[in-house]
Amino acid sequence: EAGVTQSPTHLIKTRGQQATLRCSPISGHTSVYWYQQALGLGLQFLLWYDEGEERNRGNFPPRFSGRQFPNYSSELNVNALELEDSALYLCASSYNRGRGNQPQHFGDGTRLSIL
Amino acid sequence: GESVGLHLPTLSVQEGDNSIINCAYSNSASDYFIWYKQESGKGPQFIIDIRSNMDKRQGQRVTVLLNKTVKHLSLQIAATQPGDSAVYFCAENWRDSSYKLIFGSGTRLLVRP
């Protein structure tokens, strides 16, 4: 079974630009989560999508947004990039429908560097 | 953000010994907990989970213990191997109708040959 896949692996942008990160969940998983792992700050929850809808977001400004497509893949968009947005962005997926909490399985992330 | 600031304590163990990694979680209303292993350059890898109606769960070479009285979680690794060297995170889910995970600060495990 293929795991969660993310693209690109690395992304280099300059301040003020926009970045798009992509995630394909494990087959059969309907929930996608985005987390930010900045150096020295651990993993912080960004967004949760399920069945195409945004269900919850963390304490991040509105320039962090995303969407989930009918095939359950997801995009994370970051507008007006700032130096502090440099981090590893991790996507996770799970299948929760009627089952309560289930393990979230992670991809290997996209390393976003802002110059 | 909601995660704890990272200072990354380190646990160094001899190959073959047992390892115990501890985690203090933040919310007494949390009802689901997961341990993850993260190797350099990779995403977190699921190890084991436990729900709040249990106090112990065993997997292959790993055991998770949950003490809700003191809000403490531990991961025990039996017969630690060099491949176990990584950063280990505990994560909790707050019972707020969201499945988002709140991560602890992580512990680096170093296995000495």
Image (cartoon, helix red, strand yellow):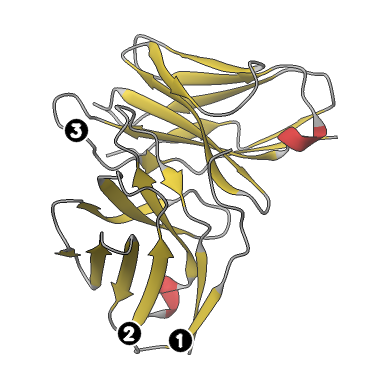
The answer to whether residue A45 of the structure is visible from this angle is yes
B30 lies left or right of B44: left
- Residue at the spot of label 2: B18
Determine the CA span between mark 1 and mark 2.
8 Å
Q: Amino acid at mark 2?
A: Asn
In the depicted structure, whether residue B64 falls above or below residue A102: below
Q: Chain of mark 1?
A: B
Disc 1 and disc 2 in contact, CB within 8 angstroms: yes
Q: Residue at x 15, y 31 (%)?
A: A99
The location of residue B76, given as percent across then percent down, is: 30, 74
The answer to whether residue B80 of the structure is visible from this angle is no
| Of A7 and A57, the residue lying toward us | A57
Q: Chain of mark 3?
A: A
Q: Which element carries disc 2, helix, strand or loop? A: loop
Q: Which circle marks residue B13 in the picture?
A: 1
Task: Place residue B7 in its image quadrant.
Answer: bottom right
Q: Amino acid at mark 1?
A: Val
- Tell me if mark 3 has few (under 14), some (14-19) or many (20+) residues whose alpha carbon lies within 10 angstroms of its own: few
- Residue at the spot of label 3: A100
Q: Same chain for marks 1 and 2? A: yes
Q: Which tag is nearer the camera, tag 3 or tag 1? A: 3
A59 lies left or right of A47: right
Task: Place residue A65 in its image quadrant.
Answer: top right
Q: Amino acid at mark 3?
A: Gly
Determine the CA span between mark 3 and mark 1.
36 Å
Q: Which element carries disc 1, helix, strand or loop? A: strand
The location of residue A90, given as percent across then percent down, is: 52, 38
Position of the N terminus of chain A, as image quadrant, is top left
